[in-house]
Amino acid sequence: MDWSAFALSLKLSVWTLVLLLPTGLLISRWLAWSQFRAKPIVQALLALPLVLPPTVLGFYLLSVFASNSSLGGAYASVFGTSLAFSFEGLLIASIIFNIPFAIQPMQRAFETISRDVRDAAACCGLSKWQQFRTIELPLVWPGVLGAAVLVFAHTLGEFGVVLMVGGNIPGETRTIAIAIYDSVQSFDNHAAAVMSALLLVISLGAIALVFSLSGGDDRGAVKN
């Protein structure tokens, strides 16, 4: 069992959640309640990581992060290190390929809030922040929690984008998914099996939690 790779995967998952969820919450709220001509295009772009092959997404991100690119060159000039094959580059890539897993569950949750509820809150004199904190968040928390679980589990198991953008640097970009691949390549099936079983348990628990939240909402709707 490669505990350093697992620890790095946990670190990547936590930082992805911390940076992506607040932004995703605002974007999902905006998409749920806004109507504009370019909305289908915006939604398609945000959902693109779901259907784009990980190696293709990783290739484009690696091209953008390279030191001879505008972004990669600017980062290297400021921080003195390359964005490609670094934890920081891996984190940016993780945020990008997790966008649909964060936004879609929360957007669906915001869409269930009736406009009458929002209008009533405004008539009661609540500010936008008070409406968001005391009314909207309690109503959409299952979607927020579901998004957090999906992002966390997906980050732990992602392989293609991580390998393309981060490579395989121990302690820096070597995640548990890459460690599993390396174990198989070196015929260490026992280590691969242990790490795979760990990811299986985490993924199964994450999916069960999401379905339990959805089931809870359905039961409440039937009772009402």
Image (tube, helix red, strand yellow):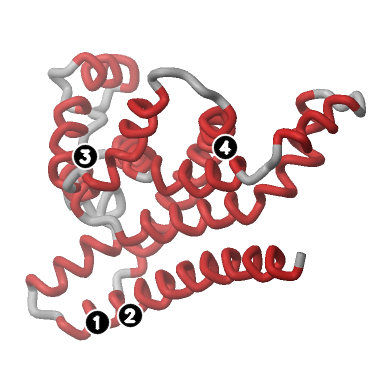
Left or right side of 47 for 135: right
Left or right side of 99 for 181: left
Residue drawn at x 25%, y 63% as measured from the top left: 177
* CB contact under 8 Å: marks 3 and 1: no
Categorize mark 2 by other alpha carbons within 10 Å: few (<14), some (14-19), many (20+).
Answer: few
Residue at image mark 1:
193
- Residue at the far right: name it: 124
Amino acid type for the residue under numbered disc 1: Ala
Residue drawn at x 48%, y 39% as measured from the top left: 20
Q: CA distance from mark 1 to mark 2?
A: 6 Å
Categorize mark 4 by other alpha carbons within 10 Å: few (<14), some (14-19), many (20+).
Answer: many
In this rendering, is residue 205 above or below 75?
below
Q: CA distance from mark 4 to mark 3?
A: 29 Å
* CB contact under 8 Å: marks 1 and 2: yes
Residue at image mark 3:
85
Closer-to-camera residue (218/28): 218
Residue 52 is situated, as x and y percent measured from the top left of the image, at 20, 43
Amino acid type for the residue under numbered disc 4: Leu
Residue drawn at x 16%, y 83% as measured from the top left: 189
Sequence-wise first label, 2 or 3: 3
Q: CA distance from mark 2 to mark 3?
A: 27 Å
Q: Where is the C terminus found, in terms of image quarters? A: bottom right
Which numbered dot is residue 25?
4
Q: Is residue 130 visible?
A: yes
Residue drawn at x 19%, y 39% as measured from the top left: 57
